[in-house]
Amino acid sequence: MTPRILIIAGSDSGGGAGIQADIKTVTMLGGHAMTAITAITAQNTLGVDAVHPIPTDMVIAQIDAVVRDLGVDAIKIGMIGSARTALAVAAKLEELPGVPVVFDPVMVATSGATLADDATIAAFERLMRHATVATPNLPELAALAGRPVEGDAEQRQAAKALVAEHGCALLVKGGHASGPQLCDRLFSVDPGDPPEIEWSDPRIDSESTHGTGCTLSSAIACGLAAEWDLPEAVARARRFVRIAMREAPDLGRGHGPMGQQAVRLDLNMSFFEPMLNQVTVPAQDLAASERFYRLLGLRQIVRASPRYARFETEGGATFSIATDEAYTGPVVYFECGDLDVTVAYLQQQGVAFEQEPRDRDWGWREARLRDPAGNAVCLYQAGEMRRFPPWRLADA
């Protein structure tokens, strides 16, 4: 069933953040986006020119209309518009017990414009009591905590205090910290999860960061609606954001929009339905095969001469050629939402594997088997490493 995601947030006329980023994210992840617009903004990549809050009664009417007819599997809350609307939305959430809620406490736009006054920020506490997870960045964490949070120790202390006070998990986003590595930390309330999980990745050098928080929180909501647990939903959402940043279309003169529309075939939201997105065929003369496939119009993204090359096709599927003796025929690759779960299920059905799930040096986790005709099949997970490995050609 298509996940139904209700987005309660403001509109961005520039299309980079807010409702527009949310809809693009939910659509690319296979969900159906429904909206309750809380504010209309006049903005672009350079800043916010004007903000017009939507009356609270109209916000609630939008929520009631979609829930009554379409139903809802997860809720994402972004820019809330006013303290009155925040309190009314919190009251409405009481009528929807069991629905996962992702709360992105938007206070300041990427450009620096203020999007929430003190009264609205104070009302955020009511929303946090109903949230499954809140996703503050470091300045927002300080505002919620009511004090500066400089350094890892203070950030952890503030996050744990908020989790204990409000009973919702907290994903503290580290994008505002300095350094070449970006670190995000999830502080959980679920006794079945580790109390703290950390993800660290190389920082992507880009000005196209408008809408990163909106995109992340909407992607988490999609994961929760698809019944992934919170840590896995966060991990998958982070991968979506990073690929969308790498695919940014370079629009505008300021903090540009991301490329959610270009994230295809990179994240499988299904537990048991593999996604076909990669094929490898044998080659004898790598240079000759490289030239042939470039002439066909494929974009070369990896070169490991004289052994291997990978290409990207329109739509995001990848295609490889290999001179290794191991490749005596084509290998079809299906990316799985959860490789280990998929392999365990297939083994219970009597399917034999030549290689059980194994982490490879190139960042993929793979399991290999053959179909009844003897064709080689690889089930795997790769995420960002399929199209954007660190050794991706600079001129790709």
Image (spheres, rainbow, N blue to C red):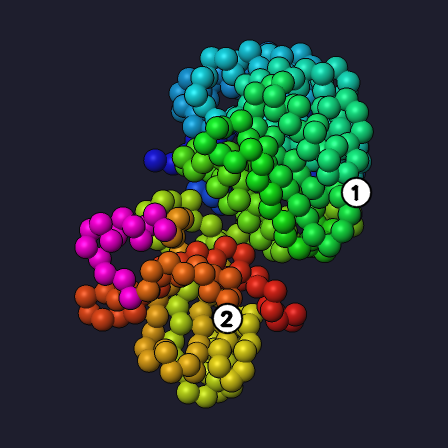
* Image location (x, y in percent) of residue 197: 57, 40
How many other residues sit within 10 Å of disc 1, few (<14), some (14-19) or many (≥20)? some
Quarter of the image with the C terminus is bottom right
Quarter of the image with the N terminus is top left
* Image location (x, y in percent) of residue 186: 59, 36
380 to 8, vertically: above or below: below
Q: Amino acid at mark 2?
A: Phe
Q: Is residue 38 visible?
A: no
Bounds of the magenta segment = 340-354
Query: Horizontally, is 198 left or right of 179 in the view?
Result: left
Residue that appears at 33% across and 60% down = 356
Marked residue nearer the N-terminal end (1 or 2):
1
User: Which is more toward the observer, 325 or 23?
Assistant: 325
* Image location (x, y in percent) of residue 384: 54, 56
Any mark on residue 311, and which?
Answer: 2
- The residues bearing labels 1 and 2 have C-alpha atoms spaced at a distance of 35 Å
Residue that appears at 35% across and 70% down = 331
Residue 353 located within the stretch drawn in magenta: yes
Any mark on residue 46, and which?
Answer: 1
* Image location (x, y in percent) of residue 219: 53, 39
Q: Amino acid at mark 1?
A: Leu
25 to 56, vertically: above or below: below
